[in-house]
Image: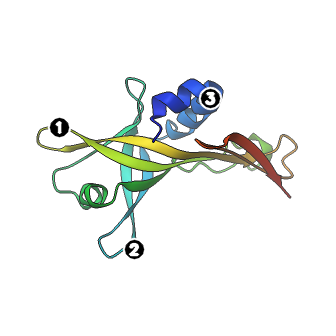
């Protein structure tokens, strides 16, 4: 498993751009796996502190119980629409997936979010195609362009 700090050390510019997208608003969206295997979507605050990626949760919150049982997660940055006057100026959106590791935290839950995938999707400079930049620990960073 790769920590955010390890990823950011290997891909500092990519990590910075992803962090900027998560910082545009306070609440991100997180997907976890329920006990019956179905997905759960929850709002969450993402904290890039001390080189790591963390989320917190209130005591006995369902998303925390999900992560304790099955640590897989996916995070999506806050959504910001593309400017009407120039779609190519859209900063894009970012997604992070991986496994949560619960840390000792009295009275509430705190998780370190290790990463298995980081994705940044935006438009090309011309604004005519979609550009998908992704990172995986086994193949590094790749960029795909779609019409």
Residue under the image location 58 percent in, 32 percent down: 15
Q: Quadrant of residue 137?
A: top right
- Verify CB contact (< 8 Å) between mark 2 and mark 3: no
Residue under the image location 58 percent in, 37 percent down: 18
**Kind of element beneath mark 1:** loop
Position of 4 with respect to 118 (left or right) is: left
Q: Quadrant of the N terminus?
A: top left
Position of 97 with respect to 64 (left or right) is: right
Q: Quadrant of the C terminus?
A: bottom right
Furthest residue toward bottom: 36
- Look at mark 3 in the image and give the residue it sits on: 11
**Kind of element beneath mark 2:** loop
Q: Is residue 118 above or below residue 61?
A: above
Tell which circle, 2 or 1, labels the residue nearer the N-terminal end. 2
Image coordinates of residue 14 in percent, x first then y, are 64, 32
Q: Is residue 62 above or below residue 95?
A: below
Q: Is residue 101 above or below residue 63?
A: above
- Report the Cα–Cα distance between label 2 and label 3: 33 Å
The residue nearer to you, when weighing 128 against 104, is: 104
Position of 146 with respect to 37 (left or right) is: right
Image coordinates of residue 7 in percent, x first then y, are 54, 32
Tell which circle, 3 or 1, labels the residue nearer the N-terminal end. 3
The residue nearer to you, when weighing 59 against 70, is: 70
- Look at mark 1 in the image and give the residue it sits on: 105
The residue nearer to you, when weighing 81 against 137, is: 137
- Look at mark 2 in the image and give the residue it sits on: 38
Question: Is residue 83 visible in this depiction of the protein?
Answer: no
Furthest residue toward left: 107
Image coordinates of residue 120 in percent, x first then y, are 65, 44
Residue under the image location 41 percent in, 46 percent down: 27
Question: Alpha-carbon neighbours of circle 3 within 10 Å: few (<14), some, or many (≥20)?
Answer: some
Q: Is residue 126 above or below residue 35?
A: above
């Amino acid at each position: 498993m790769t920590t955010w700090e390890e990823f950011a050390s290997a891909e500092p510019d990519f990590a910075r751009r992803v962090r900027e997208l998560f910082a545009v608003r306070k609440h991100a969206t997180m997907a976890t796996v329920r006990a019956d295997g179905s997905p759960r979507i929850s709002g969450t605050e993402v904290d890039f502190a001390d080189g790591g990626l963390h989320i917190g949760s209130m005591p006995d919150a369902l998303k925390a119980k999900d992560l304790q049982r099955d640590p897989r997660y996916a995070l999506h940055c806050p959504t910001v629409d593309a400017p009407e006057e120039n779609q190519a100026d859209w900063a894009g959106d970012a997604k992070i997936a991986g496994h949560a590791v619960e840390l000792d935290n009295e009275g509430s839950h705190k998780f370190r979010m290790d990463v298995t995938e980081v994705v940044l999707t935006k438009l090309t400079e011309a604004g005519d195609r979609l550009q998908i930049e992704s990172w995986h620990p086994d193949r590094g960073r790749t960029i795909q362009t779609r019409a």
